[in-house]
Amino acid sequence: MDMLHYIMPLNPGVIQIANAADLDPQIGFTERDVQDRCIDMHIEALDYAANQFFSGKLIPYGLFKDMLQSIMARRQYYGEGVPLRHYCTAATTNLAVSADGKYYACHMFTNMPKYEVNVRSSETRRNITSRHDHPQCQTCLDSHWCTACVGNFEIMSPGDPKPTRTHCEVTRRGSPTSRALRK
């Protein structure tokens, strides 16, 4: 909340507050009590952003904006009740070009050969994990609100990118469904 209040007067388009992603417990928030504190802080920020939104003010907290965009994209492109397949925009509206001219699905994947893409191909997302790749996502009631950084998943679980406990808890506890139940 301190970060949100400090940055908001600068009128940024978006405020992204992300956990560090690293397997080193000193860096990557791998201990459960630290994860729980991070989850609680994100939920507090989401609650604040949602309350402000329903009072007519949009707080540019990235996670809240991502959830709103997920709702709009689902309605606009997929219709009601049809879940979005992808967590993120990697290799759809997001591409990165490395210094050597190679294309990657996202800046998070630069110099990772697995994520190099051929922009002339229709298979640019071939190695990008989606909700359909993880059993826990297929049964999660809040997967349609879920937005995530697959690059972060790759860092935390190299070679087998998957959602982290922290990510899933923030999504579940921060979802509009959970919010409605808490009130």
Image: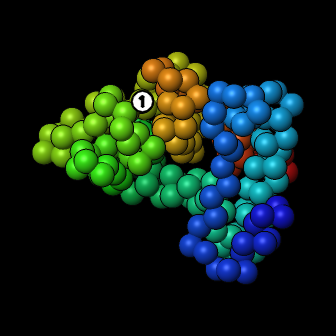
**Number of other residues with Cα within 10 Å of mark 1, as a class: few under 14, some 14 to 19, many 20 or more:** many
Q: Is residue 151 left or right of residue 2?
A: left
Q: Amino acid at mark 1?
A: Thr
Q: How is the image coloured?
A: rainbow
Q: Is residue 169 above or below residue 3?
A: above
In depth, the one of 179 and 152 nearer the eye is 152
Residue at (25, 48) in percent of width and height: 100
| Among the 4 quarters of the image, the one containing residue 65 | bottom right
| Among the 4 quarters of the image, the one containing residue 17 | bottom right
Q: Is residue 84 left or right of residue 171?
A: left
Q: Where residue 108 sits: x, y (%)?
A: 45, 43
Q: Is residue 136 above or below residue 107?
A: above
Q: Is residue 113 left or right of residue 33?
A: left
Quadrant occupied by the N terminus:
bottom right
Residue identifier under label 1? 129
Residue at (69, 28) in percent of width and height: 24
Residue at (50, 30) in percent of width and height: 154
Q: Residue furthest left?
A: 120
Numbered disc 1: secondary structure? loop
Q: Where residue 90 sits: x, y (%)?
A: 38, 45
Q: Where residue 161 sits: x, y (%)?
A: 49, 26
Q: What is the count of numbered marks?
A: 1
Q: Can residue 114 be seen at all in this image of the molecule?
A: yes
Q: Can residue 138 be seen at all in this image of the molecule?
A: no
Residue at (66, 49) in percent of width and height: 18
